[in-house]
Image (tube, coloured by chain):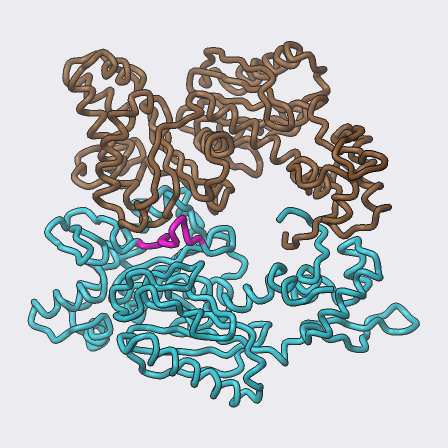
Chain colours: A cyan, B brown
Amino acid sequence: MTGDVPGSPGDVLTLIGSGSATTRSDLARITGLARSTISQRVDALIERGLVEETQGGDSTGGRPARQLRLHAEDHAVAGVDLGATHCRIALMDLTGRLLAAAEDPMRISEGPETVLDHVERRIHALLEDAGRPPTALRAMGLGVPGPVEFATGRPNNPPIMPGWNGYPIPDRFTTMILVDNDVNVMALGEHRNAFPEVAHLLFVKVGTGIGCGIVAGGALHRGAQGSAGDIGHIRVSGHDQAFCHCGNTACLEAVAGGEALARRLTDLGFSAETGSDVVTLVQNGNTQALRLVREAGRLIGEVLAGLVNFFNPEVIVIGGVLARVHEHLLAGVRETVYRRSLPLATHDLVIVPSRTGVNAAALGAGTLAIEHYLAPDNINRIVTC
Amino acid sequence: MTGDVPGSPGDVLTLIGSGSATTRSDLARITGLARSTISQRVDALIERGLVEETQGGDSTGGRPARQLRLHAEDHAVAGVDLGATHCRIALMDLTGRLLAAAEDPMRISEGPETVLDHVERRIHALLEDAGRPPTALRAMGLGVPGPVEFATGRPNNPPIMPGWNGYPIPDRFTTMILVDNDVNVMALGEHRNAFPEVAHLLFVKVGTGIGCGIVAGGALHRGAQGSAGDIGHIRVSGHDQAFCHCGNTACLEAVAGGEALARRLTDLGFSAETGSDVVTLVQNGNTQALRLVREAGRLIGEVLAGLVNFFNPEVIVIGGVLARVHEHLLAGVRETVYRRSLPLATHDLVIVPSRTGVNAAALGAGTLAIEHYLAPDNINRIVTC
């Protein structure tokens, strides 16, 4: 929506939450609304437990002005990161502060009923740890390792999630829940926590496969069908003999993904099944593994060089299992991007390993939930005055 | 800005201009502002000649409500499209209606003084044709065939614009002017006129060189340094012997741009210097030219296939000189995109020739000017109440 003079209950909450307004007078001045309207809206937000008002300090004499602030304490959101073999949960308050966290081994292939039962039990235990009642949970965000139809929260033909295709995840919970693919929530978690001031950011996950989360103008870009960022099947040159499970040849993922590297190491006589095994070999000083990771970095760099020309990001973050050996991976990425992209686009470009690391997805899923819950439209739905 | 209850003079104008509000009562209801505040803002907009109020019709009995509407008649904006060898100007009112247009041959290489003098004289003549005084001109948009620092309106090392590098175009005019590169204004012109309901669109210009304008979430995506969309230097496979003027090899533009095709036709013994000559040969039934254009379509398609996976657009528009033989060019593009992109991303993808054709850039430049002039922040600057 256009407009620099917001005025709905949701807008009032946004002004308080961001610190732009700390008193009723601030709100009246910023919005241009009548004092009576402001009072009505603030009272409704207090009644719903979203805002609290305290006796304040910085007055210019006379009675000190009462201070408004987000009442974060009575609320909680959960950010859930489901991987192929893990479940991480971050319990946060509405300001994004971490209250409690959990990490369990969990096979996504056990199917939605088993996995989501576990998620629900775990969230309840975390709420108890944090000393909050189950009713404090306002919203959940959930990242899954596969494509999702974001509007309905249903996985869409996810290759490594048997039993999940089309499963209506939101129907399973009474709490509001947003479901997205893992790379999108990772991009959001990394952006909001490590690069909040950056407008255009790419988060590249190099794990079993390769995917990318896109932040454009500060917001996630999901594209027309929600499939944006699927860079694992972009063609790289000189690898026409590499077959990909998608049916094409020379896909980036088929030559530079963790699974592809493990397969090539196996062919060379080393024991490796997953990207994690490749990382272990590199850490143990295996020169073949090191050579392959660096070469993978060059191939990823070839694809990113084109995307840098096209998208002109400020920051590229490399995450995922392979980022654990980021010095070797990034060397290859940087080498190719700086050679192949246009000087104007690389002049101030920053290419770095993920700062939020293994927590990127759970933090991002929680952020997704908070931002959706605090969005003016949602607050206006739950607060009427 | 957040907020679904706008209230500044600029917001009030936006509500009137979009047809969301046609009476003062509508404005009070939608914004939640007091009637007295609404009156103050509407009166200020009427005083500045931006809004007019007429006796209206659809009342529910009693005195008919007065109707508010954008007062487009006293205002004009100019959209200017400067190419290597042409100057097109579209004079429009604030609703985007075309008032008058001109097209002249003009060499951009004559330098900024000569070219911009011509532009100014031409706009004054068009205003006279349209029966409006010079003072009616509120804003100008200008598209140039090279990179521009959008914030300052200065061309940034444009290869085919001698004398323009760093030239402060806005200082040359007393009217507010926005300067952008030609592909961005083409994308905007095509989007607003032919695909206003589409969120994510790519406009690919295939002329002497190859560039792309990006519409993401309905807005132009310019990227961190304003260089987004520079796809002409993305690497294509199998052409490592093709040298590009940028210093790299195998750039898309070096093998599929109009100049590259003309050079290859010259090598084959045909007379061709420009993309336009290539088009003429194809139209005259030259099978070598036709073969090269189709092959160029395949190479452009190879790059676009990757960008479809990454960006997931709803629509790709092909424009520029080579789009005059779009049936051959598009055949190659579609063939490769549908073979190489992911099924989910191509399921509803539309690839079409430009509908606004040679007028895309002038219309887009005019749209850029209108949207900037009517933006709430700008209206708030010029209307105080």
Is residue B102 shown above or below A63?
above
The residue located at (18%, 36%) in the rendering is B239
The residue lying toward the viewer, choosing from B316 and B383, is B316
Query: In the image, residue A193 lies at what x, y percent?
Result: 50, 67
Q: Quadrant of residue A379?
A: bottom right
Q: Is residue A351 magenta?
A: no
User: Magenta: predominant secondary structure element?
Assistant: loop
Q: Is residue B309 left or right of residue B109?
A: left
Residue range corresponding to the magenta coloring: A221-230
Q: Quadrant of residue A207?
A: bottom left
Whether residue A32 is visible to the viewer of this picture, yes or no, is yes
Q: Is residue A106 left or right of residue B385?
A: left
Query: In the image, residue B205 lies at what x, y percent?
Result: 37, 30
Q: Is residue A222 magenta?
A: yes
The residue lying toward the viewer, choosing from B297 and A302, is B297
The residue located at (15%, 14%) in the rendering is B269
The residue located at (84%, 41%) in the rendering is B40
